[in-house]
């Protein structure tokens, strides 16, 4: 990554279902922006994330009410020369051929994943909300510099706080 290129640290979170764990807040601190890939659960979660960094959010299948109606189902954003498309359920992804994106961020499955398919990077930060089955509690991060992007999944150590939400 070039020193002369402005780098962006983009925090990724999904499937909070109304619960923003203190460990998730800590992991997202220092982000230039935060992407929430849906199933947010409440306006309060968005407000708490906005206290950390500007938030880009999409509506998930469990997001209902006036606050949720204001959110798009999908959105394209750019950091540096990297185009990112955000959608909750990857199965609903239908990109037009003219839409240029390098990364797709989704949620819904609660399963964290970073995967390259050809030139496209697909990232699901997993779930940072209530535990589902035995899936890990995670968030993610994109490091963007110019036309380069790297994704990381960050496990949340909820044992440190006894797993209690704030």
Image (cartoon, grey):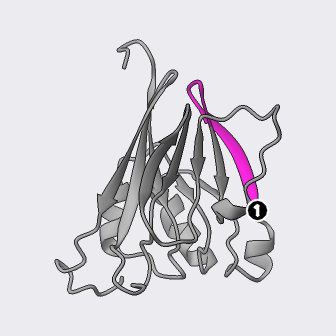
Q: Nearer the viewer, residue 23 or 103?
A: 103
Residue 15 in the image: x percent, y percent? 53, 73
As drawn, is 30 to the left or to the right of 104?
left
Q: Main secondary structure of the magenta part?
A: strand
Residue 6 lies, with reference to residue 133, above or below; the image says: above
**Dividing the picture into quarters, in which one does residue 59 lie?**
bottom right
Residue positioned most to the front = 118
Query: Where residue 133 sits in the image (x, y, percent)?
Result: 39, 87
**Residues packed near mark 1 inside 10 Å, few (<14), some (14 to 19) or many (20 plus):** some
> Residue beneath label 1, please?
73
Furthest residue in direction top, as rendered: 4
| Range drawn in magenta | 74-83
Question: Does the segment drawn in magenta span residue 162?
Answer: no
Dividing the image into 4 quarters, which one contains the C terminus? Answer: bottom left
Compare residues 133 and 16 and report the one nearer the observer. 133
Residue 145 point in image, percent of width and height = 45, 25
- Please report the residue visible at 44 percent of the width from the left and 68 percent of the height from the top: 111
């Amino acid at each position: 990554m070039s020193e002369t290129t402005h780098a962006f640290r983009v925090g990724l979170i999904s499937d909070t279902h109304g619960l923003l764990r203190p460990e998730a807040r800590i992991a997202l601190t220092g982000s230039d922006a935060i992407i929430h890939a849906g199933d947010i659960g409440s306006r309060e979660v968005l407000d708490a994330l906005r206290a950390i960094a500007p938030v880009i959010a999409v509506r998930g299948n469990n997001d209902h009410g006036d606050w949720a109606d204001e959110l798009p189902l999908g959105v394209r954003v750019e950091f540096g020369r990297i185009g990112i498309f955000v959608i909750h359920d990857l199965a609903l992804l239908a990109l037009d051929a003219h839409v240029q994106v390098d990364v797709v961020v989704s949620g819904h499955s609660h399963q964290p994943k970073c995967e390259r398919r050809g030139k496209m990077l697909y990232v699901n930060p997993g779930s940072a909300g209530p535990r589902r089955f035995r899936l890990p509690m995670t968030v993610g991060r994109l490091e963007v510099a110019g036309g380069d992007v790297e994704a990381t999944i960050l496990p949340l150590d909820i044992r440190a706080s006894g797993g209690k939400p704030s």
